[in-house]
Image (tube, rainbow, N blue to C red):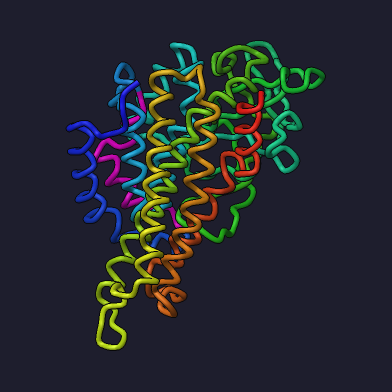
């Protein structure tokens, strides 16, 4: 397994992303948060940079970048705009089941459209009474001739109303518990409806809503994998995607730390920069140490995705997601503190970083669930 020092190509990519984010993403971030509207200008800029293609295999029109490079991309985007980073993340999440378990038909039809930015994707697993308890889902898929008819409501769906495709998990055999769950690739114009968009604390430029399927007919060719394989696909997908949520959290934390350091260098009290104060230096040192530890844990998990997914990916993916998101929450709170009263205003981005950081502790499995996953792998 490779070490965690970035190679020359990764370092160059990170440098390019720095300039791109500063010029094309950061100027739109505050407005996306304020308006609560999808950041289309930023997304179009990402398409120009071929960022949606990064996680798609080269055989299907993508770049086929390694997972550490994808983590760098997400981190750099999140430094400026969490909502934009989420737009890129969620389409990859929606396509992971197709990449690893989909038929050649599904791969050839849908992956190139996501890679070139023509289409976006969502991942529909959660329900009102089936968040962490996936087996409790009630969405049904009934086979009818050459199709499946899907009925149910999915909650907390990122990119709802924007996405062109929805990866939907539904029960084909309700009597079989989690073994009766199957996965489907559903096109939006087949009858998918969004009944409600949530009013959220953070990630406000990324819509989250209720997705309703009322007897939506899905061709049998759009079954992902085999009937009854859905739970395995869902868990395998989350194992592979959680490290990039950690990368998003690292990016948010880095953006907050960068802003705080710039501020304390300029802010003067008693005719001296407040960065001269030892108490403030200790805060910054702790923030920097925790951030680097989180970043390395994310890179470790990402390396497992590419090189050894069947060994300890579940454990390290959960560790990366939980530790990085807890770190992001801690750092953004401390960064806001360093701004003093100014940090508590919308004039500065600190409160946005803090609001965006919070959801990284919740989605793709709460950090309490991550700790259960970790403990089970450690204890056995």
Nearest to the observer: residue 364 or residue 38:
364
Residue 358 in picture, x, y percent from top left: 54, 55
Residue 312 visible, this angle:
yes
Residue 203 visible, this angle:
no
Residue situated furthest bottom in the rendering:
270
Residue 13 sits in quarter = top left
Q: Is residue 223 above or below residue 293?
A: above
Residue 180 in picture, x, y percent from top left: 73, 18
Can residue 230 be found in the magenta stretch? no
Residue 56 in picture, x, y percent from top left: 36, 25
Residue 110 sits in quarter = top left
Q: Residue at x 56, y 48 (%)?
A: 361
Q: Residue at x 50, y 61 (%)?
A: 355
The quarter in which the N terminus is drawn is top left
Residue 257 in picture, x, y percent from top left: 35, 60
Q: Residue at x 25, y 34 (%)?
A: 6
Nearest to the observer: residue 27 or residue 349:
349
Nearest to the observer: residue 370 or residue 93:
370
Using residue 265 as the reference point, say whether residue 317 is left or right of it: right
Can residue 38 be found in the magenta stretch? yes
The quarter in which the C terminus is drawn is top right
Write down the region rendered in magenta. 37-56
């Amino acid at each position: 397994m490779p070490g965690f020092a970035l190679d020359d190509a990764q370092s160059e990519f990170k440098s390019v992303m720095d300039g791109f984010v500063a010029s094309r993403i950061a100027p739109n971030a505050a407005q996306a948060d304020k308006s609560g509207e999808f950041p289309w200008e930023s997304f179009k800029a990402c398409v120009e940079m071929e960022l949606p293609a990064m996680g798609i295999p080269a055989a299907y029109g993508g770049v086929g970048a390694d997972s550490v490079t994808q983590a760098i991309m997400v981190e750099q985007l999140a430094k400026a705009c969490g909502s934009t980073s989420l737009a890129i993340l969620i389409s990859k999440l929606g396509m992971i089941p197709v990449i690893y378990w989909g038929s050649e038909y599904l791969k050839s039809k849908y992956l190139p459209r996501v890679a070139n930015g023509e289409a976006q994707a969502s991942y529909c697993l959660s329900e009102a009474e089936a968040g962490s308890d996936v087996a409790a889902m009630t969405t049904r898929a009934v086979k009818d001739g050459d199709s499946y008819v899907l009925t149910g409501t999915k909650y907390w769906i990122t990119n709802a109303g924007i996405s062109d495709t929805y990866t939907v998990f539904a029960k084909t055999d309700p009597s079989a518990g989690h073994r009766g769950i199957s996965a489907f690739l559903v096109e939006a114009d087949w009858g998918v409806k969004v009944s409600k968009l949530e009013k959220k604390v953070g990630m406000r430029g990324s819509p989250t809503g209720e997705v309703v399927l009322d007897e939506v007919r899905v061709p049998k060719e759009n079954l992902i994998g085999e009937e009854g394989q859905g739970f395995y696909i869902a868990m395998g997908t989350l194992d592979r995607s959680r490290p990039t949520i950690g990368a998003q959290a690292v990016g948010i934390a880095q953006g907050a730390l960068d802003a705080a350091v710039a501020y304390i260098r300029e802010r003067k009290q008693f005719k001296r920069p407040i960065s001269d104060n030892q108490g403030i230096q200790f805060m910054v040192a702790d923030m920097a140490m925790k951030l680097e530890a989180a970043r390395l844990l994310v890179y470790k998990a990402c390396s497992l995705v590419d090189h050894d997914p069947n060994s300890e990916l579940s454990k390290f993916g959960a560790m990366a997601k939980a530790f990085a998101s807890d770190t992001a929450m801690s750092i953004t709170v401390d960064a806001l503190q360093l701004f003093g009263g100014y940090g508590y205003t919308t004039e500065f981005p600190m409160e946005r970083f803090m609001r965006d950081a919070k959801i990284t502790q919740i989605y793709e499995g709460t950090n309490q669930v991550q700790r259960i996953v970790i403990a089970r792998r450690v204890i056995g």
